[in-house]
Image (cartoon, rainbow, N blue to C red):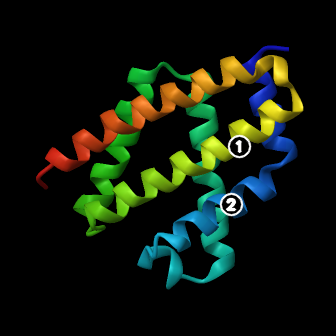
Amino acid sequence: MTPEQHLETFYRENRERAVLHFYDSLCAAELKSYTEAPREPTLVAVGASFDNLISGLVNRTPEAYVESQTAAFKKRIAGGVDPKDILAGLKSAETSLTWLIEQASAERPEFGPQLRRMGQQYLLMTHMTAISIRTYQP
């Protein structure tokens, strides 16, 4: 098993906890689109976002991931979502992924260094996406 496969497997086995962690992080950031929305449908959407995050991290090149995320976020901004909310959401995703990587590393310590590098790669992708969002003018 590769570190990427372990992360995917660990995520699938612990998806409910991971999604709740992400959701709680988004709510703690006081993002209206999460705090004012009904919990269950929002959890479904957060779960789909985290699924996409894990899939993108494991299966796509960093460039392709940044391009797809930036395009999706630009559509949301054009639809009226405040860019600050998107940036706060990226920060929450970063925090949640770090938590997931630490949990997965504790289960398989031999994969810890590679998983942490994946986390660092995600941080870089997040920063690249954030730069695109900050400079976007709909």
Quadrant occupied by the C terminus: bottom left
Q: Which mark is residue 21?
A: 2
Q: Which mark is residue 116?
A: none
Check the image and name the residue furthest to the left. Answer: 137
Which kind of residue does numbered mark 2 sit on? His
Side of 54 relative to 86 (left or right): right
Q: Quarter-wise, where is residue 30 in the image?
A: bottom left
Q: Quarter-wise, where is residue 82 in the image?
A: bottom left
Q: Secondary structure at mark 2?
A: helix
Quadrant occupied by the N terminus: top right
Which kind of residue does numbered mark 1 sit on? Leu
- Crowding at dot 2, Cα within 10 Å, few <14 / some 14-19 / many 20+, comes out as some
Q: Position of residue 8 (x, y in %)?
A: 76, 32
Residue for badge 1: 100
Q: Secondary structure at mark 1?
A: helix
Side of 37 relative to 87 (left or right): right
CB of mark 1 within 8 Å of CB of mark 2? yes
Q: Residue at x 75, y 30 (%)?
A: 7
Side of 107 relative to 39 (left or right): right
Side of 10 relative to 68 (left or right): right
Q: Position of residue 128 (x, y in %)?
A: 31, 33
- Crowding at dot 1, Cα within 10 Å, few <14 / some 14-19 / many 20+, comes out as many
Q: Residue at x 34, y 51 (%)?
A: 73
Distance in Å between CA atoms under marks 1 and 2: 9 Å
Q: Earlier along the polypeptide chain: callout 1 or callout 2?
A: 2
Query: Is residue 83 or residue 115 the one in the foreground?
Result: 115
Q: Residue at x 40, y 41 (%)?
A: 69
Vertical placement of residue 70 versus 3, above or below: below
Q: Quarter-wise, where is residue 112 in the image?
A: top right
Q: Position of residue 72 (x, y in %)?
A: 37, 47
Q: Position of residue 50 (x, y in %)?
A: 62, 49
